Structures are given as C-alpha cells and as structure tokens.
Amino acid sequence: MKSRMRAFDLWNMFWRCFLVQGSWNQMSMLGLGFGFSAIPFIKRIYKTRKQRDECLRRHLDFFNSHPYFASWCLGAVAKLEEEAQRKKWEEYRPIEIFKERLVGPLGGIGDRLFWCGLKPAAAGLGILLALTTGWFAIPIFLIVYNIPHLLVRIHGLRAGYRKGFDIVSELSMRRYQKWFDGVDLAGAAVAGACLIAALRWIWRGGAHPVLSGYPAGIVPLTVFSAALLLTLAALHFNKSRHWTLLGAVLLGILLSLAWTVA
Amino acid sequence: MWQELAVVSLWGGVVALDTTAALQILISRPLVSCSVVGLLLGGFPTGFLVGLVFELLYLDELPVGGALFNEGNVGATIAAGLAVLLARSTGRPELALFLASLTGLVMSKTGGQIVVLLRQLNTRIYARLMARPRITPGAVTRAHLLALLCMFAAGCLLTLAAVAGFGYIFHLAAPLVPPGLDRHLQSILYAFMGVGCGVLLHHFFTRRNWWHLAAGAGFGIMLWVLLAALGGGGR
C-alpha cells in the first residue's frame, strides 16, 4: 500500500532533528524535542485534533538518546505510526515499548562513537593542523567531523523509516566495535603527533605573532613539560584539571622568574 | 565598541546553542568559535591562539545527558573576546592573554551552572505543556522554541556581561600590574598547552593502543624534520 508520507515530510523531520536536544529536561529528557521533531508525520498521518493530541502525548513522553541518533528512532516511529493507522491497531503500546528499548543502544553507540571517539580525535587533528599549518585547520576539523555526523543522521532517518521495528538489527554494539576501535587508534596516533607538534611549536616560539616578549626554547618547554606531567598524574588520581592548571600556571610564572634572576 | 560587544554577544548565543541545544556541528568548539571572535574583532591571530589552547583543555568534555559539565565553549569565546579587546585597549597582549584565559576558566564553570538552571526551566516549560487539556502541534513548537530562545539569550547575556564587565575592570586594573611581569605571565599559554596535551594523551592512551600513540609521535617527528627541511612551514 502506498505511503502517506511525502519526501517533504522526511526533510521537515530531518531539519527538526538538529534541534532535538533544545528542550532537554529532567522529566522527559529528549521527550519534548522528539515530539517537536515528530510533528510533520503526526500532521500527515492524523487528521483530527483528538488523534493528534493522543499521538503527541505518546511522543512527548520520556525519550533519550544521543542527539545524532535520535533520527533513527524518529524514522522508525513514523513508519510504525503509519502502519498502526493503516492497519487500525487497537493499542499503541508496542510503539512505546519499542522507543523505550531503543534508548540504551542509541545513547550507548552515539556517545561512544561521537562524544568519546570522533570528537576528541577530530579536535586532536584540528590542533595538529593548527600547530603546523595555521587557520587551514578550522575547515578540515569541521569537514572531518561533520561528514560522518550528517551521514549518521540521514542514514538513520531513512533506514528507520524503511525498516520500522527491524531497525534494531542495525543497532548492536558489536556491529560498531570496529568503528570504535578504528576511531580510538586514529585518535591515539593523532595524540602522539599532536604532542610532537606542540613541542615543536613551543620550541620555535609559535606564539610570537601575538606575544613578542618571550624567548623560544628552554623556559616555555620546561613549563609545558611540567604541566603535562602534572596533568597526567592528576587525571590518573581523578583530580580536577582546573586546579592542576592553576598549579601549573603558578609553577610556570615562578620558573620564569627564577630563570630571569639566574 | 558597543557594536563589537553586540556582535560578540550574539555569537556567544550561537555558541551556547551549538554546544548542546541545536545543530551540534561543532562551530561552538573553541578552535572555531574563538577564531570567529578574532575575525569579528579584528584580532584573528589572538582569537586563534586562545581557541587552540582552550580546545586542548576541553577536548574530552562530554555534554552527555544530564551530566554537569564545564561550558568550555562559551568560556573560551569570552576569553577570546576579552583577549582581543584588552590587548587593544592596554597595549599589553601578554597581560591580556593571562587575564582573559583565567576569566575563561571561571566562565566555563559559571556556564555549566547556567545550563543546569536552564534545564530546570525546561522542566517547568514541559510540565506546563503536559498540563494543558489539549496539546496541539503549535503548542509543542512554541514550548520547544521557547527553550531554545532561553538558551540563546543566556549565551548572549553571559558573553555580554563577562566581556563588558571584566573588560572594564581589567582595563582599570591593568596599570596596577608592573609591565616587567608581562613576559612571565606568558607562562599561562605553555601551562595550558601542557595540561591540554596531558588531557589528550590521557583520553586516548590505553595498553592496547600505546603503539599507535608512539607511531603518531614518530609521524610528528618526521613532520618536524620535513617542515624544517622546507624552511619552517609556518605556524
């Protein structure tokens, strides 16, 4: 049977997904954002005010996921609501259970892949390029991060709408393990290269276009190394990086003064 | 001056939105947002430098779910604005960078607390919506956009208050700092970078992938040699 949804509705849902986390709250978490993103398909599928009210209440309820992965659930729910309307389901509890079951995988995969993996790795690459090539780093950083980001959003909405309940087959942690490993390994390599790039930048007085009064070489390098070691120790013992930073700044100023006196 | 402050404040609102509420395409990351502030205020190198060090520092900050996090993006944007404006008004870029960086740290903490307050406000908006006898698409849209507007306004106001307020105070207080101390205050830059590199290494180092880190370091050394052979390569 032909779908009631139009391509325009999917686009409308797609851009709304970018705002899904805008009203995050302690009661429904992403619930209000999800309801906002669901409006295009609700308006398309349900024609009476009462039906729309009931459907909105269902989707304004608790929901949480990684923001980029919310489109996966949204596409699938649009498909299921359409089916429910067409086949005249007596109750909508299966859709609610389905949404509840997706919360864990969508959050776990998204946080692991993007927040813990790709974001720091892309930022590390941006810093590496910033230290070696300058402003060129900014567009590269944005492109490297946003291509996978947009692909995940687009694929999720389309696959969710195509597969409905079956979208769960695409959401096992094991399926993504190689991506997690790949991003971690790339991030480690970038971190190593970044460390050397920072040493080179400090050694050569990279800040000279902005700050002119400091000699490149041994003093900045000593401050940098002391701060690095202090931070590694502090993070190992779960101490705040802000206090570590203030300690390192103080140490740096004292070292600099001592060097001048000597 | 007021025009510049207004533009930076609006950008602060955009940064606050992109951090958690909308888009999340990372234009709010310090490397990007501080460079934009630098461009807007006519001090791109300073903005870029501030962005570089704050990006390292807050590289692994996770805006996950209801977690309380440091709003490093807005903090860095404020730091960049202050650094450019203070360097211009005092003529002492080292002192400007020092004061702006410390302010950025404090504002990151403050921003994190403001996000908590905004989430409480969102809870009230949500509760009011659900208490309505009939929920319409228009009511949902209004409630959601109101929450977004509050986030934008908070980012704008925080940026405006911090850049204007601290900028004025530091401008008055700058003559009290002996100029001879300026070059020593630059240590903050290298301390920031050291802490940032520590954060980066700690985030990615595991027993399993240590050799990738070593390979990356080897690549970095090769890059160093290559750039030296090519005559420096620029910053």
Image: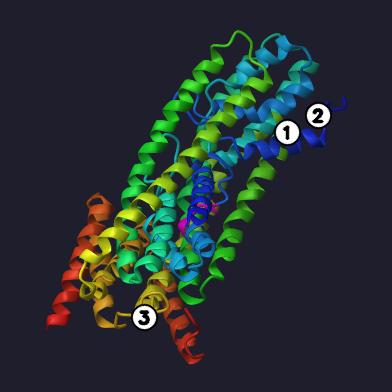
Q: Are marks 2 and 1 in contact (CB under 8 Å)?
A: yes
Residue B67 visible: no
The quadrant in which the C terminus of chain A is found is bottom left
User: Tag 1: Cα neighbours inside 10 Å, few (<14), some, or many (≥20)?
Assistant: many
Q: Would you place residue B9 above or below residue A41 in this image? A: below
Left or right of residue A77: residue B29: left
Mark drawn on residue A205: 3
Identity of the residue drawn at 39% across and 51% down: B164
Which quarter of the picture shows residue A71? Answer: top right
Residue that carries the numbered disc 1 in the rendered image: A161
Query: Start and end of the magenta stretch?
Result: B26-30
User: Tag 2: Cα neighbours inside 10 Å, few (<14), some, or many (≥20)?
Assistant: some
Which quarter of the picture shows residue B112? Answer: top left
Mark drawn on residue A5: 2
Residue B103: image x %, image y %?
A: 32, 54
**Residue type (three-letter) at the residue carrying disc 3:** Gly
Pointer 1 chain:
A
Q: Are marks 1 and 3 on the same chain?
A: yes
Left or right of residue A212: residue A60: right
Identity of the residue drawn at 39% across and 54% down: B58
Residue B158: image x %, image y %?
A: 42, 44
Q: CA distance from mark 1 to mark 3?
A: 54 Å
Q: Judge by depth and name the residue closer to the eye, A88 or B200.
A: B200
Disc 2 or disc 1, which is closer to the eye? 2
